Amino acid sequence: MSRPVRVLIPVGFGLNCEEETSAAFRMVGAEVELVHLTDLFAHRAPRRLADYQVLAMVGGFSYGDHIAGGLVLATRIRAHLQAELAAFLAGGGRVLGICNGFQTLTRLGLLPGPEAGPPDFVPRAALTNNDRLGYRDAWVRIAVDPKTRSVWTRGVAALDVPSRHGEGKFVVESSEVLARLDQRGQLAFRWIDAAGHPTEAWPENPNGSALGVAGVTDSTGRILGLMPHPDAFLYPWHHPDYARRRAELESKEAGGLAIFRAGVTAD
Amino acid sequence: MAGAIRTHLGISIGAVRTRDVFHVEPALSAADAARVASEFAGPVVRRGEVGRVDDGPFDVAVSVGFKPGVTDPVGKSARVAIEDLLGRKLGAGGAVYASRVYLLSGVSRDQATRIATQLLANEVIERVAVQPFAEWQAAPPDLSVPRVVEHPPRPAGTVRLRGLDDAALARLSRERLLALSVEELRTLRAFFERAASDPARARAGLGADPTDVELECLAQTWSEHCKHKIFNATITYREEGKAPEEIRSLFKRYIQGTTSAVDAAIRARDGTSWLVSVFHDNAGVIAATGRYHLVYKVETHNSPSALDPYGGAITGIVGVNRDPFGTGLGADLLSNVWGYCFGPPDWAGQLPPGLLHPRRVRDGVHHGVIDGGNQSGIPYGRGWEFFDDRFLGKPLVYCGTVGRMPVRSAGRPTEVKAARPGDRIVMVGGRIGKDGIHGATFSSAELTEESPVQAVQIGDPITQKMMFDFLLEARQAGLYSSVTDNGAGGLSSSVGEMARQPGGAWLDLSLAPLKYQGLAPWEVLVSEAQERMTLAVPPAHLPGFLELARRREVEATDLGEFTGSGMLEVRWGRQVVGLLPLDFLHDGDPELRIEAEWKARAPVPAPAQAAPSSAAEGNALAARFLARDNLRSSELLSRAYDHEVKALTVVKPWIGLHRDVPSDASVFMIAHDGDRTGYALAEGVFPTYSDHDAWAMAQAGVDLAVRRVIAAGARADRIAALDNYCWPDPLPGEKNPDAREKAAALVRASRGLAEICIAYGVPLISGKDSMKNDAVVGGRRISIPPTLLASVIAIVDDVRRAVTLEAAQPGELLVLVGETRQELGGTEWAAARGLAGGEVPRTTPAALWPGYQAVARAIGDGLVQAAHAVGRGGLLHSLFLLARAGGLGLSADLGPSPVKGAVDWEGRLLGETTGRFLLAVEPARLDPLRAALRAVPHAVIGAFDAGARLRIGLGAAPLVDAPVDELARAWKREGRPA
């Protein structure tokens, strides 16, 4: 058996989902290293970015969501780490951004990224204020867009997950731009209703994103960002129906793990 | 925002647009400023401009920014972004100030002023400008910034006590906000007169009067907030028909004494105890798994939240985070709890001047604790609200935090602090400003119109999170030997307290990092500026500690040294500005004596009300009752608090098919390490029972909290409790004629607490008291009802076996465990009826406990599908919650309920007799369950069905027969503001 896939989880500055995201990657067989962003910025971390196969930008409140979610962290990454990040991506590195991580990748211009070619770090989309009620922690259901080419969704269909954000409405310049992203399979995850269809209606869609966008991939399919938290559904007893549907939920793997497995086992 | 303006202020407003404004010092070049504006705006949704955004027409502009010196976390983050974007530092005098402009359409200037002062801004901490459109257009952009005007450092002074008469001493205490009594000041005066002959004092150039540093340091240390003088006082307790009794320290006798007794009983039974560290540290510690201990602390932050609800509350939550973090060598934080007592949010009566409307208090407090918890990455486990008119004067804002500490860190037991002489005193985290000066002494006084602005601090969760991340690394590397937080009293408390272990300390205040110049030494010493911890760092580790701090962008400063001198020596550069023996500092205060007198109120019988004559009448009653402030669902609001970050939450705060029913207890895992051991959290609080007897009030709270964790599947022999007393002032004063009764309530609550905790084997591992919950405004005194919050934490052997209120299948039977008595006094039903009389629910702890053990065993053996502890609102509320949670129909007959004495329909349906459980059981498991409960009064009173109605009857008479959904709509107040 080959060496386990090595995952880098940067920490610090108000990120806070490193513990569960580490657990998720370890549960699917990866080796995880947590490295403080100050060490990455100062280039004094034990390894270079290129030594990892996966970079995971976890959820949290980097810099308190001040000014806009992910903004200050993205500005700092651009200042200190952009060249290394570009080389990591050129070498085939895979990136997962959850919630605040997705906001950060969007601010960095990695998502949705250019239509073709290497990343140019030009922001083209925004994750803006939810249409209704602001921040809300509630379980919802998401599904993979069958058209998507994301490496993070192989073997994933639909799953229940908690949504926990106030700025998650995905907005691009025009509906034509959104339609092109859709055609290209870049709108990887959708909020779905009870019938399984993408929805724009609250509360199934917590933020009001057009076409029910919950997660986005870049043109290569190697970078995925999503607003809801698969890192919060790692055991059957995380599910809010566990007390009533114990046997059924115990009979299968917790829904969040498939995404991490897909990303770890992709090549 | 427009919605809030319409519903809260009744102003029909048009559009509201907002502009985030950043003032940068020193000024940027035009090109740099444009880069910053473009970066901050980002693509698609926002525009960024230098100067003014072209705003189009509007009617009035309202600008809101901080006053000078107020914490500005957004400005601080903006500075980091700007410096990285431009690739250069703004420099020592540089700063970024964040503010916001609201452009309002469809309002007059006067209306805009109301909107500004009553909704958008709090003038305690913010400055406001209101400009009509024409004025706004004519004026250039406002370039002023709230820079603090810096003064040269002020020297320490001497405060003359000699020769002052009592009136002058009282004036001194009042004017300097010392909150010291005349007797305490006389003790101080005598001490300094004696100390003048001490050669050390003479060598230091100090005389027979205290320096301002010494006086302020003593005032903080001796404040009620820090010293708990009332709980340590000698109380003479009188009760009619009994001989007066003298109680030396309620704390030692009823709190510590209880825990010692319970600990001894645990040791006698098990040979060992699961109490790891209690009372002497910032939070209580109990054993949990082979890897981790659990740490728990609950605090209140009432007075600051009354003045600035948002700032007071966010400081409350991030402040209590530092308690578990400052326990032993520090704990990782796992979950928060919150609970608030407010005046009614729809209060339409007169509001005394100086008080904020309770709706505004409520909104601000929620917002503050939401931001504080969410931004810190800590889920909440428990949240509740209680409403009563008397909380208009002082809201109660309880915040608590659970942490886990590794059993060992860097080879040492984590719960043990070990500061030694020679260790350096290092302050870590935020800088010191004038914020929060006199917080401890201020909260030890009643609220008045003149309450000080400086007493309000604003927590900054991100600064604190970065500090915690750094300190956890340092803890794992073994770089320090002790840690405590800087909360009330600032450095004077943290260093003064830590110095007890090594036996002395000196520190140089001139080394402390300041937000701005101009603070006097005493201000540096007592400032409660937030996000700071004080550590003891062995000299050998100092360079490594400071280097790690620098790398993590966290400020750490070496301020002095722990010694064995027996003295706290305070320096300003080379000058000694304070020299206090530790034993005088900590134990020199005169003993307080309190008179307490209890007048038992003869129970006034409650006039009975006729039973509903039809189900329709009962349904209307139920819908109205369930919609009451104290019973209705606040799920919508609570979901703005994260409850599952860290992915350790198993039983969430809101459960059931619709996920809108409050769980009895929340259950969490402890770590992602494969261990399935968890912990359960619950609480109980019954302020209105104090109107009858604080003894019953205290016991009802503990009883409910304990029953709730048992209902959730916790071990009955691993339950610990925290006591948080919030009391009206029990000390006599000209405006406090019933102080003796308030003191008597304190005695009775403490006795009730001790009795129930010993009977249940529940140790009190931590607690806090807040004794000045009165407001005197416009000559009128508003006192809160004596309120004891009981918070429990209990071990769950396997989180997968946790139980909720959710019945799973039609056909499951409903079993009521425990007797019901005719107890309506102080209940929610009594409040609904406007009833003053009746018997208050009284708990019989020793009689009840064997039954609780039986219920815990039955749940542990898997006999029960769902369990619930009956609480406020009685069986009506409970039966509704059970039907709603399972998404099933439920029919119940209260006829077979076990009762004691004559109990009518009100007593059965709406009474709040303690000690009762409701259990849902599959028919096949009924017999083993009944066998397990054979020694406990119980009865099958109903069954779940596939229908959708809640039917409650008393024999043949129907009391309620309504669709659960319909009741739920009333209970959720659908269509009405949250």
Image: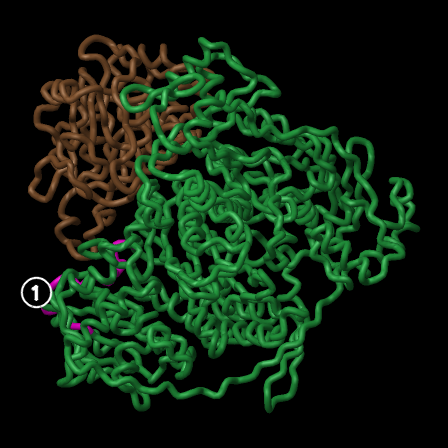
Q: Of residues A263 and A194, which is closer to you in this image?
A: A194
Q: Which residue is mark 1?
A: B946
- Give the colour of chain A: brown
Res B329 quadrant in image: top right
Q: Of residues B927 and B626, which is closer to you in this image?
A: B626
Give the left or right position of residue B660, taking residue B246 as reference.
left
Instruction: Give percent across and percent down for residue B6.
Output: 33, 46
In the rendered structure, which amino acid carries the disc numbered 1? Ala
At 60% across and 33% down in the image, what residue appears? B431
At 73% across and 48% down in the image, what residue appears? B216
Magenta region's main secondary structure?
A: loop
Q: Of residues B365 and B499, which is closer to you in this image?
A: B365
Q: Chain of mark 1?
A: B
At 57% across and 30% down in the image, what residue appears? B146
Up-down: is B593 above or below A223? below
Give the left or right position of residue B51, taking residue B901 as reference.
right
| Residue B412 visible to an observer of this rendering | no
Up-down: is A183 above or below B787? above
Q: Quadrant of the C terminus of chain A?
A: top left
Give the left or right position of residue B494, taking residue B184 as reference.
left
At 59% across and 42% down in the image, what residue appears? B483
Instruction: Give percent across and percent down for residue B633.
Output: 28, 58
Give the left or right position of residue B622, taking residue B426 as reference.
left
Instruction: Give percent across and percent down for residue B10.
Output: 35, 49
Q: Secondary structure at mark 1?
A: loop
Q: Quadrant of the N terminus of chain A?
A: top left
**Does the stretch in magenta take in A226?**
no
Magenta segment, which residues?
B799-814
Up-down: is B401 above or below B856? above
Q: Residues within 10 Å of mark 1 (few under 14, many from 20)?
A: few
- Give the colour of chain B: green
